[in-house]
Image (spheres, rainbow, N blue to C red):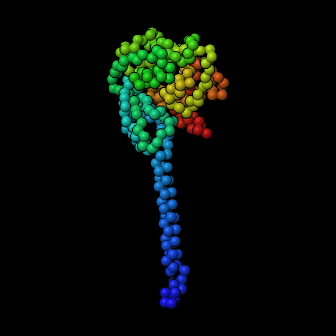
Amino acid sequence: MADNKNEKKGGFFSNWIVRNLIWAAVFVVVLLVGTNILLSIGTQHNKEITVPDFTNMTYEEAVYNAERVGLKVEIGDSVYVRRMKKGAVFSQFPKSGSNVKKGRTISLTTNAKTAKEVTMPLLVGYSMRQAKAELASRGLNLGRLIYVNDIATNNVLKQLFNSREIPAGTQIESGSTIDLMVGLSGDDNRTYAPDVKGLKYLRAVDAVHDYSLNVGKVNFDKGVKTYSDSLNAVVYKQAPSTSGGPLTMGAAVSLWLTTDEGKIEELSK
C-alpha cells in the first residue's frame, strides 16, 4: 500500500518503466543529432574545390592562394622560358578549373633560372592527346597541329622543331616548342570551338589544342605590355565562337585578351 501511495504521489514520471523509456528516447535523439553533425562535417571535409589558376605566381603567392581555399602546392618540376620571370609558375596539375578534394596537393612546374636540356621523346604513333601529355611531362610545349590525310585521325606522323623533323633522343632546351604532323581521316575530321572566354592565355591555348584546333591570331589590349602581362591576360573574345557550328580539325581560333578589370568583370555577368 505504501509503494502504491508513493507511485501515486510521484506521478507519471515516478514509474521506472516510463523513466527508462524516456531515457532511451533521449539517447536516440542525441545519437541522431550527433550522427547528423558528424555527417555534416564529413561532407564538408570531402567537398570538392575548384583549383585556382596559379600561372605566373611566385611559389609563395601560390602557397598563400592555395591555403586560402584549402589546398596545398608543391614544386614538381621546372622548365626554362626565356621571357618569363624566374621562379614563376609555368603550369600546374591538376589544371585550373578542375574539381578536387579539400587538402589535395597541386603539382607546380616553375620557370628555372637557367635553361636545362631534356631528351626529345618519340611521339610518332601516339595519339595527339598522348603526345601533348608527353611533351608537357618533358617541359616542352605543343606548337601547331599540322593535319594531313591519313586513315587515323590525330595519329602523330611526324615531330617537328623549327620546321624540321627532330629525332627521338635529341637533346633540346626545356621550354622549346614542338609542332606535330597528325593524321586526318575523311570520316572523322570535325570538332567544335571550346569556350575559352575567362581563361588566362596559356590555359586558353591548352583548351584550344584539346579540341584539335590551332591558336590563330592573338590580339592583346594596349594594357598588355610585357610577357608577364600576357600570361595574366584573360580571353574576353574569341572567333569563331562556340555557337559557330562544327569546324575542321586544325582550324584556327583567334583570341582577344585583356588585363582590364572592367572587361574581365563583364564576362561573369
**Front position in the image: 18 or 77:** 18
Q: In the displayed structure, would residue 74 be above or below residue 176?
A: below
Q: How many marks?
A: 0
Can I make out residue 25 in this image? Answer: yes
Residue 3 as seen in the image, left or right of residue 105: right
Of the 4 image quadrants, the one containing the C terminus is: top right
Residue found 41% across the figure and 38% down from its top? 105
Residue found 50% across the figure and 80% down from its top? 14
Farthest residue, direction top: 164
Q: In the displayed structure, would residue 49 be above or below residue 210?
A: below
Q: In the displayed structure, would residue 69 be above or below residue 148?
A: below
Farthest residue, direction front: 1
Can I make out residue 162 in this image? Answer: no
Residue found 56% across the figure and 17% down from its top? 153
Q: Position of residue 84 (x, y in %)?
A: 41, 26
Q: Position of residue 158 (x, y in %)?
A: 48, 12
Q: Position of residue 110 (x, y in %)?
A: 38, 29
Residue found 43% across the figure and 32% down from its top? 92
Q: Position of residue 45 (x, y in %)?
A: 46, 48
**Front position in the image: 166 or 4:** 4
**Front position in the image: 177 or 187:** 187
Farthest residue, direction bottom: 1
